[in-house]
Image (tube, rainbow, N blue to C red):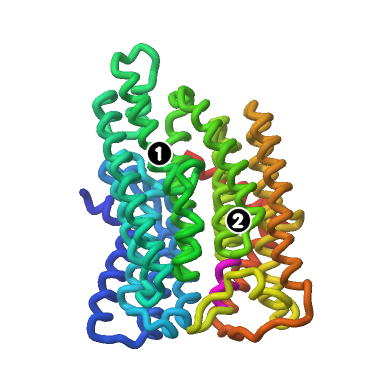
């Protein structure tokens, strides 16, 4: 690895070195506020470096890209880590989390997500995916006195280990079929006339099983509601946004870099998208727990993304990147409201606990409503623009039937999102919860501003994303 490669990796190195430093400091110094502040500073420095660093080699050690596409997601995931840490200060203090370990794991996760978003090799894909997944295994069960968290962590670990096995075996078969780990070349093993083509198809099918687990595609989604419910709310926010978004970005990198070579997988992806949207929508409708409802809704959103990926067009890839950005802020905002209302006794998860909170806490009630309506696709929010470009790309690419199913699933989503809003404002009586603090309200302000700004004025970001697509 050359000096230029190291410079290109500067944002990730800042995250990793900062995380390692805070981990060692936390072994002797246990006051959470300075450690969290240090983590926020490290994440923001990494975001600035990723955003302003001069052009670098397009590929690092044959494993990762340092192109503008990868830099964009390095900025996004670094900012996400900073917001998660800001959201976590009071939450972690009240539950006596080990601050050094907690902050470092969040930063390690962001580093892995940044690498995954620019992976150009099967080896890079595997290493980066497992690096942040290992951190999430720990974070999901970080609250040691929470039995639900321990159960969630065990389920995530066991199923994640199975998914890792599928991915490793799939990569081995792909290498046997193509003779390379480099993604564009590895996809050539699917071409007609290749004598090892069946093994290549089987290998990519196994990799899709692992990817389906990571982003909760049906039928690999069964872990999602239990893990969302049991994990600490800030960790659930990271799991719902960065974890799935980084895999989505990696899919864009893989498919955009190999146009036309993966058409054999389109029928399978089509079926996965259809099942994901239908099953996720039907399972979200009867939920009485807000975190489980958001879990099933996240399943549906991954089906939307897959719908736009199928045409293999630049418009579809741009739509996916834009939607990932909007979804990140909307989903983070929803979990931020849950976090800000929680206290040492627990989180308000059951819908009955939210009755009338829109009147008692009008700001947070309005933010949660805006985030949910954006996820539903209400006009004047970023979610509406995101869904519009997703479905338009699918229709333009010839997947009209699947786009119609996606639109129907989006209409169904109004039923379960508006149900939460009605609970918020359905009664004047409510119980008193935590008033929140300045950092939590700052995160809420960032999220709702991004949602509304991208809904009212999306053109600059759409134009920027169009220039980033590989």
Is there any visible trace of residue 69 in the rendered image?
no
Secondary structure state at the residue bearing disc 2: helix
Residue at horizontal 27%, vertical 40%? Answer: 168
Is there any visible trace of residue 117 in the rendered image?
yes
Does 452 sit left or right of 37 as displayed? Answer: right
Dominant secondary structure of the magenta stretch?
helix
Residue at horizontal 28%, vertical 49%? Answer: 127
Q: Nearer the viewer, residue 288 or 185?
A: 288
> Does the segment drawn in magenta span residue 339?
yes
Does 96 sit left or right of 272 as displayed? Answer: left
Magenta segment range?
334-340
- Judging by the rendered image, the residue that carries numbered circle 2 is 326
Query: Dot 2: within a 10 Å radius of its alpha carbon, few (fewer than 14), some, or many (20 or more) residues?
Result: many
Is 248 situated above or below 381? above
> Does the segment drawn in magenta span residue 289?
no
Is 92 situated above or below 193? below
Is 144 situated above or below 208? below
Of callouts 2 and 1, the N-terminal one: 1
Q: Position of residue 252 (x, y in %)?
A: 48, 40
- Judging by the rendered image, the residue that carries numbered circle 1 is 209
Disc 2 and disc 1 in contact, CB within 8 angstroms: no
Which picture quadrant has residue 141? bottom left
Residue at horizontal 40%, vertical 58%? Answer: 53
Q: Position of residue 395 (x, y in %)?
A: 68, 31
Q: Position of residue 391 (x, y in %)?
A: 67, 39
Q: Nearer the viewer, residue 297 or 222?
A: 222
Which picture quadrant has residue 147? bottom left
Secondary structure state at the residue bearing disc 1: helix
Tell which tag, 2 or 1, sits nearer the viewer.
1
């Amino acid at each position: 690895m050359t000096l230029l490669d190291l410079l290109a990796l500067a944002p990730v190195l800042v995250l990793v070195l900062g995380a390692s430093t805070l981990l060692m400091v936390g072994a002797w110094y246990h006051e959470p506020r300075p450690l969290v502040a240090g983590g926020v500073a490290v994440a923001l420095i990494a975001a600035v470096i990723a955003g302003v660093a001069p052009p670098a080699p397009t590929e690092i050690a044959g494993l990762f890209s340092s192109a503008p596409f990868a830099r964009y997601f390095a900025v996004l995931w670094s900012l996400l880590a900073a917001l998660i840490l800001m959201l976590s200060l009071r939450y972690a203090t009240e539950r006596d989390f080990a601050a050094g370990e907690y902050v470092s794991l969040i930063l390690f996760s962001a580093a892995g997500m940044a690498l995954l978003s620019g992976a150009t090799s099967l080896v890079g894909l595997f290493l980066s995916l497992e690096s942040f997944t290992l951190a999430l295994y720990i974070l999901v069960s970080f609250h040691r006195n929470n039995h639900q968290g321990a159960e969630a962590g065990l389920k995530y670990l066991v199923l994640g280990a199975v998914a890792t096995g599928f991915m490793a075996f799939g990569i081995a078969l792909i290498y046997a079929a193509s003779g390379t780990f480099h993604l564009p070349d590895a996809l050539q093993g699917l071409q007609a006339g290749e004598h090892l083509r069946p093994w290549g198809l089987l290998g990519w099918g196994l990799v899709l099983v692992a990817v389906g687990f990571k982003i909760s595609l049906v039928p690999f989604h069964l872990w999602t509601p239990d893990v969302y419910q049991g994990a600490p709310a800030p960790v659930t926010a990271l799991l719902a946004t960065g974890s799935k978004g980084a895999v989505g970005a990696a899919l864009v990198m893989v498919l955009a870099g190999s146009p036309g070579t993966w058409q054999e997988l389109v029928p399978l992806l089509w079926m996965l998208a259809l099942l994901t949207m239908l099953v996720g929508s039907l399972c979200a409708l009867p939920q009485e727990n807000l975190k489980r409802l958001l879990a099933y809704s996240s399943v549906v959103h991954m089906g939307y993304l897959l719908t736009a990926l199928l045409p293999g067009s630049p418009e579809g890839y741009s739509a996916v990147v834009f939607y990932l950005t909007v979804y990140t802020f909307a989903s983070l905002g929803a979990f931020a409201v849950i976090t800000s209302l929680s206290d040492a006794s627990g989180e308000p998860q059951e819908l009955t606990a939210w009755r009338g909170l829109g009147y008692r806490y009008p700001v947070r009630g309005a933010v949660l409503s805006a985030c949910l309506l954006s996820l539903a696709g209400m006009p004047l929010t970023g979610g509406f623009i995101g869904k519009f470009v997703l479905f338009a790309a699918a229709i333009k690419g010839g997947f009209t039937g699947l786009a119609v199913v996606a639109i129907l699933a989006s209409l169904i989503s109004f039923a379960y999102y508006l149900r939460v809003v009605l609970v918020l404002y359905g009664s004047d009586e409510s119980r008193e919860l935590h008033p929140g603090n300045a950092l939590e309200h700052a995160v809420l302000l960032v999220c709702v501003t991004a949602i509304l700004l991208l809904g009212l004025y999306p053109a600059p970001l759409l134009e920027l994303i169009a220039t980033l697509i590989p």
